[in-house]
Amino acid sequence: KVNYLSDYQPPNFAIGSVYLEFDLQPLATRVTNRMLLTRMAAGALHLDGENLQLISVTLDGLEVTNQCLIDENGLQLMTDKDQFELVVVTEIAPQSNTALEGLYRTSNNYCTQCEAEGFRKITYYLDRPDVLSVFTTKIIADKSENRYLLANGNMVESGDLADGKHYAVWLDPHKKPCYLFALVAGNLEKITDTYTTVEGREVRLEIFVEPRNIDKCDHAMQSLKRSMQWDEQRFGLIYDLDIYMIVAVDDFNMGAMENKGLNVFNSKFVLAQPATATDVDYEGIEAVIGHEYFHNWTGNRVTCRDWFQLTLKEGLTVFRDQEFTADMLSPSVKRIEDVKRLRSNQFPEDAGPMAHPIQPQSYIEMNNFYTMTVYEKGAEVVRLYHTLLGESGFQKGMQLYFARHDGQAVTVQDFRQAMADANAVDLAQMHNWYVQSGTPHLQVTAEYYPETKTFTLTCKQSQPQTKDFVPLLLPIGFGMLDQHGQPLILEPTFESAAHVELRSNTHAILRMTQLEQKFTFMDVSSPPVPSLLRGFSAPVKLHFEYSNADLALLAAADEDSFVRWEAMQTLLLRTIQSKVSALQSGSELALSNEVLDVAKALLEDEQLDAALVAMTLSLPELGYIGEQYQEVDVDAIYQAHHWLESQLAHGLQSQWLAAYQRCQNNGPYQYDKIQIAQRMLKNVALSYLGALPENQALVASQYQLQQNMTDVLAALRIMLVHQHAAAQDAMQDFYQRWQEDNLVVDKWFALQAQTQNAQAVETLAVLLQHSDFSLKNPNRVRSLLGVFSRLNLVGFHRADGKGYQMVSEQICLLDALNPQIAARLLAPFTHWKRYDVKRQSLMRAALQEILQREGVSKDVYEIASKSLA
Ligand code: ARG
Ligand code: ZN
């Protein structure tokens, strides 16, 4: 069944309050659901429900079980009453729930995941985000096995019962849709802390984990406190309950979930110690803790009318968490990281068969639309408002949004209207970003007129895959440099001035609203080099014919760190592309001095931010290189990448070594901007050095030092990639050391899954048989199968199709257990059009086989069928 945005109808019943009682048993949990219903419109009452065993239905005290029509989607009941109490009793088996949606078990604990439509697997209900209700939850369970009984809101009652049971009652005073419901029970341990709000109210903070992980919660707790403070300071948003709980579980489909007052997290985004977690992990934890916390206002207090509005809460909350990380660490580093992520993961999605606008217009399975597009491109679109309105204008818009919509379930239009009204501007054109899919192209040409000393940019926007493409409101961050790299003062002509917003003498936002538009600047004494799309001011593909010399100039001198990074990356990308052509035509290629010179200058300048240098000199990712081609030549790209790496390693060996030594720090690990930057540059340097056989001992010694996981993992990866003599022993040692720590074992799997060599598929086969591999744990599946199929181009795309075959077999097995995760693993197959005809037919055959599997889930069906259509 396909759901369409255009079919939206308001609910015909409201649920004033709901009282839930859970009698927890692994195989037979009884759920009693008492609802106060009020009619809003004519028609039968339809409640959503799936995989439930119905025990009874009672209407105002009268049993009506036999009057209910039950099918696989729910329950229907005819009644003339306008207001009544309905009590529905059902039974479920959390222990057999491998889909990890609804109520399930993980490491002998109970937990729930209801977003998007999981509540209907717990009880019959109006499972839609525009039905808001006050929830009271009573949990009854065996006491020795369930020390803690948790639900949303505040605990209002608890006590012991007969037969070794106990109970707790929780009341959440805030009205909420059922996707924010949560229940957790089990023998967990907790750390506690407090946070005092700006209003002086004390909030109790609790993080619950399995007992063996209790020493890995500090960073998460600090992150939570920083999130609370940041949201007060930057957005003026204060927490609204007396307690905030976070529970970490090992089996979780996604990153985390913002259930009101009781977040449930994938343990990957909670647990950290310097010895077990990398800088990237630490940053991920801080970001996800922030993200879920920020949802309390953008998502929970103001929620979505329907699931087509998902980007309303996700795009906005990702934008907020990006800004949080930027403020905690380095804004320019964070911006570049986010752009890389968008380009390597969202751009391909936007170019493939699953392309959808940030507001999808239809879906079969909503879980398939928790995508890079809805989240990350959605955040880019929110950033457009911020770029157009500035920080203070954006904050005015946010204030109006909350003033108007607190306690409501609203749409992306409501958000835009608040932004527009608060600033008295017309933002209607922003709508086009929500309804058109595909990455827009921005084609820029420039003309210099010496007679008038003017400089004209001609900008064209287009989206080849979108028919009847309508122009987007597109802000272009802009500046100009002279031939010596000096910034030029911006003087727009009278006609251009209306569309040029000067942010300083040398920086402007060009406001593009038409398919084609010209911007002219005066008093330009010689042909300038334009600096375009500063800060990556819009999620587009920019085309401008820069010479290599222009790029070198921008890389060295532009005032915008994104443009500097981008210029160098373009130089590197061009070099790789030339090498790809050379390999394809069997000709030779030498590395140009230009590339080497700019790289050398960056590396020798000790004044520069080490993190920016590290990112600037890292090679573009294979996936992003592939993106540049209609047809991806896997082997040539891999070889060209490899070639450039060793050229830079050779050409700058002494500079790499100097940078490596300069960035050494023997003090204790700290998660701060300076140390992170040092480790980043140090490990980029080491990865170049490790490409040369003479540096094997250096890499091995970094592994042996065991200073922190960032350094250990970097060394290990380099040893594996370059097949150092000590690689296998180190991998053994690593496994021995950490085999009890699931998150570290995930890293051990992922490292091997991504190593590209002739035996990659055989390695995968061995790992699939490993006693620590399990299809039941999503993190493990992602670290082996997800990493292999996304990052191991050589292995996954092996010419004989063995890579495809091995992954698709696992997808079929997984679909029977956990359809959500199975569907996600399909993504690499959906891009079959990008490969040669032989691989195309192998990939299509795999998709067809998956599609024809008996009992295929709707999750997998939707993606496989759409990508074959
Ligand atoms: N709302 C959660 C977040 O972004 C994601 C949960 C989605 N889960 C799912 N199964 N679709 O933080
Ligand atoms: Zn979210």
Image (cartoon, helix red, strand yellow):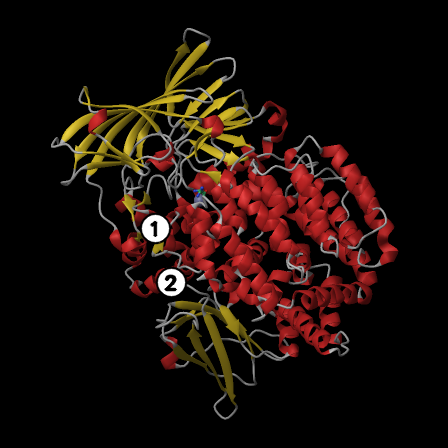
Q: Residue 799 versus residue 697: which sits nearer the camera?
A: 799
Give, as a three-letter code, the residue at label 1. Answer: Gln
Give, as a three-letter code, the residue at label 2. Answer: Trp
Q: Residue 231 versus residue 716: which sits nearer the camera?
A: 716
The residue that appears at 46% across and 64% down in the rendered structure is 538
Label number found at residue 433: 2
Q: Is residue 394 visible?
A: yes
Q: Is residue 317 visible?
A: no
What distance separates the C-alpha of mark 1 from that of mark 2? 13 Å
Q: Position of residue 531 (x, y in %)?
A: 54, 72
**In the rendered image, the vertical position of residue 550 relative to residue 844, given as above or below:** below
Mark 1 residue crowding within 10 angstroms, few (<14) / some (14–19) / many (20+) = many
The answer to which of marks 1 and 2 sits earlier in the sequence is: 1
**In the rendered image, the vertical position of residue 137 relative to residue 43, given as above or below:** above
Which residue reaches farthest top? 162
The verdict on label 2 being within 8 Å of ligand 2 is no
Tell me the quadrant of the picture where the C terminus can be found. bottom left
**In the rendered image, the vertical position of residue 192 relative to residue 512, given as above or below:** above
Q: Secondary structure at mark 1?
A: helix
Residue under label 1, please give it: 309
Q: Residue 413 versus residue 629: which sits nearer the camera?
A: 629
Q: Position of residue 698 (x, y in %)?
A: 84, 50
Q: Secondary structure at mark 2?
A: helix
The residue that appears at 51% across and 35% down in the rendered structure is 265
Q: Residue 580 versus residue 477: which sits nearer the camera?
A: 580
Label number found at residue 85: none
Q: Quadrant holding ligand 1?
A: top left
